[in-house]
Amino acid sequence: MRALALHAGLLAMLFALHFALPAYHHGNLARVMVLASYAIGYNLLFGYAGLLSLGHALFFASGMYGAGLLVEHGGAGAGPAMLAGTAAAALVSAALALVALRTRGVAFMIVTLMFAQAGFLTILHFGDWTGGDEGFVLPQAGRMLWGIDLSTPDARYLAALALFSACLLGSLALARAPFGRVLVAIRENEERARMLGYDTLAHKRAAMILSGTVSGAAGAAYAILFGYVGASFAEVQYSILPLLWVLLGGAGTVLGPFIGALFMFYLIDLASGVTTAHMLIAGVALVALTLYAPQGLMGEVRRRLWRGLP
Amino acid sequence: MSLLRVRGLTRDFDGLRAVDGVDLDIPEGEVRALIGPNGAGKTTLVGMIAGRIAPTAGRVTFDGRDITHMPAHRRMRLGMAYTFQITSVFARLSVVENVALAARRRARGAAVGPAVAAALDRVGLADRGAEMAGDLAYGHQRLLEVAMGIAQRPRLLILDEPTQGLAEGEIAGFARLVRTLASETTILLIEHNMDVVMALADRITVMDAGRVLAEGTPADIRADAAVQAAYLGGGDDAAAG
């Protein structure tokens, strides 16, 4: 009950901030909420099932290009584009789950990394359709949903909040459901989980497809809300970022992905106002967190203050 | 009819035959002890029964079904439970969650809580439910493993050296616990402590060098000359180590 109140409270606060924030931070927060949705997707696989993927940019980009290409070449609106992007990511993650989950540990990291790189190169290869590394700007028609223009700041913020709410509450429900608890059991001791009668491979597959689908939904939303589709989102950097956000915020916590994405976004934003070597400041902060809060920010809260934090 | 029936079960490891054509029949309701010197193939044999190790040859039948090629998790669903030789609990999860993971194989929703409480009560860990499993003393972790086994309500409970590493006083309590389980489930017990074996087992199977050396009641085994030579070291009451 307390947990539900906490997470609903965050969503209520984000809604209230819609009316209170100055334009600059209002725009930032919309972006952070979409990125946090991506991080929530990543956390399902990494934080709960304990599988470290280095290829989630493939899922994010599948969603982004699935949506963007349908708008660009099919003239679709935002609704069908969002669905197409999410479905594309679901398909791609299902295919990769079949292959990559034959491996574990470091091999799993390498297989996911290589497939994501292959995805990136595929985007470049079909440059006539995808715009190559320049990408393309989404036409206005593709940013309309039920007559609402999602490119305006207000609609964009609320659409991002809607996506983020769905991801956050879905993640909360999953963490408390038997399925989520089996994922944690697999993370903690897979052989024991198997010898309790759980089909651990099937659970890991389901987790990977769910994770990839949520990541893809975030990618599709990013394309529609910010109006740009580009190959840089399929690069390895976008596989590493969700890992960093989740580690910072707290792997295996429901709020961690949002806290991590917010923290990192503003850390880089503030640091770049002070110096051009802003990544140096971000790096130092990361090292400090690793030293003093290795479980991430929400992980520390769980350890010190509230052990039942989902 | 036998609940568990093993025929010609064999396993080679790189040319070394760890288990060699073992036949085994365990009737429903029996407590069967499996003994033998280190390296006799006991853990490999139960590993094949539980589905952790694929046999090189032979068949395993459980409740009339051929399960030789069935993956481990499906065997557990048919009604097996397995406790590990080396304690294997979810160290960073609470004691209650450990048992709940076992109970959810059978119970759903509101039925999980009472099933967990009952299992913890049986092993005497009722007041430690909120602790992290990894923080428990070693003996309590072994009891937690048994609680996880109980929560699955198995038809066949495989206990792989459950008293290993326990103190003398703990062993007596453990034996009492296993005896109360015997009325509810068939038990296959790998055990080195001969006092425990003699006190608990209905029948004993003795393995040596991958083969079944002898099988019979505790009194038969005590009297068997071949067993004494291979394992008991001559004296009637000698405990093997």
Image: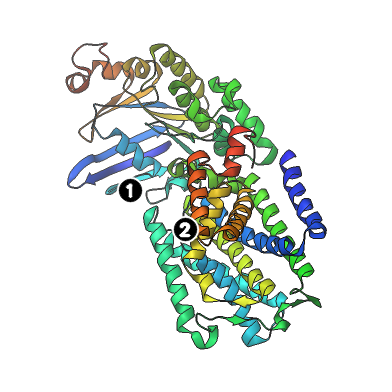
Side (left or right) of A84 relative to B182: right
Q: Position of residue B175 (x, y in %)?
A: 44, 17
Task: Check disc 1 and give the amino acid type.
Answer: Ala
Left or right, A250 with respect to B12, comes to right
Colour basis = rainbow
Query: Which residue is label 1 attached to?
Result: B54
Residue at figure coordinates x 62%, y 56% from the top left: A266
Please state if B9 lies on the left or on the right of A252 as rendered.
left
Tag 2 subunit: A
The image quarter in which residue A111 lies: bottom left
Do callouts 1 and 2 mark residues in contact (Cβ within 8 Å)? Answer: no
Give, as a three-letter code, the residue at label 2: Ser
Observer-nearest residue: A74 or B118? A74
Q: Residue at x 44, y 21 (%)?
A: B139
**Residue B118 rendering spot, x and y as whole percentages:** 61, 26
When the figure is inspected, residue A7 is found, relative to residue A30, above or below; the finding is above
In the rendered image of this protein, does residue B41 appear above or below residue B222? below
Q: Is residue A277 left or right of residue A18?
A: left
How busy is the neighbourhood of tag 2: few (under 14 within 10 Å), some, or many (20 plus)? many
Using the image, name the chain to which the residue with label 1 belongs: B
Q: Decide: few, some or many residues near mark 1? Use Cα within 10 Å; few <14, some 14-19, many ≥20.
A: some
Question: Label for residue A53?
Answer: 2
Do tags 1 and 2 sit on the same chain?
A: no
User: Which quadrant: the C terminus of chain B?
Assistant: top left
To which quarter of the image does residue A54 belong?
A: bottom left
Instruction: State how far apart marks 1 and 2 are (Cα).
Output: 30 Å
Tell me residue B177's x, y (percent). Answer: 49, 19
Residue A165 % position (x, y): 72, 57
